[in-house]
Image (cartoon, grey):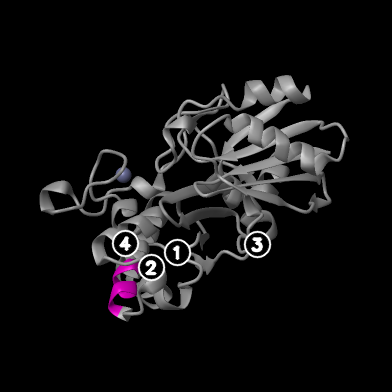
Amino acid sequence: MIGLIDIGGTKLLAAVGERGRGVAATVRRPTPRHGDMVAVLIEMLDDVRHGQSLEAIGVAAPGPFDRAGGTLMNPPGMSSDWHRQELATPLRKRFGCPVQVENDANCAALAEAHLGAGRGSRLLVYYTVSTGIGTGVVLDGELVVQRHDNEGGHQVLWPRRLGGPPCECGGAGCLEAIASGRAIAARFGRSGEDIEEQAVWDEVGTWLGLAVVNTVALLDCDRVVFGGGVAVPRWSRVEPALNATVAAHLKLQPAPEIRPAELGEDRNLAGVLLLLGR
Ligand SMILES: [Zn+2]
């Protein structure tokens, strides 16, 4: 039995899972702003394991984090009590099993590749468009992880000197600074849930389409999947401009299949289980 944790900006999820048998029922709590974060995660794991021992624990965490040490570094949008929060060491001590921490967008990408909208692809690039924008790359069913995390949300599309808006990363004009939930709220004065004007979604779709063009130019991927709380609920609004932008700009390579994500709230947990269960 493997313990699974997903640390989000607003909620924490935990469940247990078995190799080849998927994720069991999930418990959730609001992400605490202060206090002993690890104590909350331990309580949640105790709730789901029903006294059974865990053979491993996997944690889907917001980036950036220290993969080798299993420590959060400075996740944007989270309370400062989560900055430099050690996860792997205290969980390993408490449960006596190995602990692996992985980027949440990578976990979602792996889950979509095996179980969702990425099935049948050879090289999948996954974009999660929610408060921020994260990316994950899966090649032949395996997560592609290099020195650090890939940061497709911080590809620059609108340079600072041409008016690109500032980004949380310290740069400007990144995809995340233009088309994320946070950026949409800042630029248009309302949350994406409240925006019905098609012109806004045409603009968001255009930026996302450019991101697809750049992604294919570099990686020649055969599938791009968009997940997250902004892209999926508004897919029918975003898709026309996104596809039109790809068709207008991608001339040397065939367009990949572009699909909305299919999996539900436990996608990151499913991805962690796939990561540990092989
Ligand atoms: Zn940025």
Residue 43 in percent (x, y) is at: 72, 36
Give the residue type that dot 2 points to: Gly
The local secondary structure at tag 3 comes to loop
Give the residue type that dot 4 points to: Ala
Q: CA–CA distance between discs 2 and 1?
A: 7 Å
Discs 2, 1 touching: Cβ within 8 Å: yes
Nearer mark to the viewer, of 1 and 4: 4
- Based on the picture, tell me whether residue 200 belongs to the magenta stretch: yes
Label of residue 116 in the image: 3
Q: Earlier in the sequence, mark 1 or mark 3?
A: 3
Could you tell me if residue 9 is visible in this image?
yes
Could you tell me if residue 278 is visible in this image?
no
Q: Which residue is mark 2?
A: 192
The segment highlighted magenta reads 199-204
Label 3 lies in ligand 1 vicinity (Cβ under 8 Å): no
Give the residue type that dot 3 points to: Gly
Residue 95 in percent (x, y) is at: 77, 25
Q: CA–CA distance between discs 1 and 3?
A: 18 Å
Give the residue type that dot 1 points to: Val
Q: CA–CA distance between discs 4 and 3?
A: 29 Å
Q: Residue at x 71, y 23 (%)?
A: 92
Q: Residue at x 19, y 52 (%)?
A: 164
Q: Earlier in the sequence, mark 2 or mark 1?
A: 2
The local secondary structure at tag 4 comes to helix
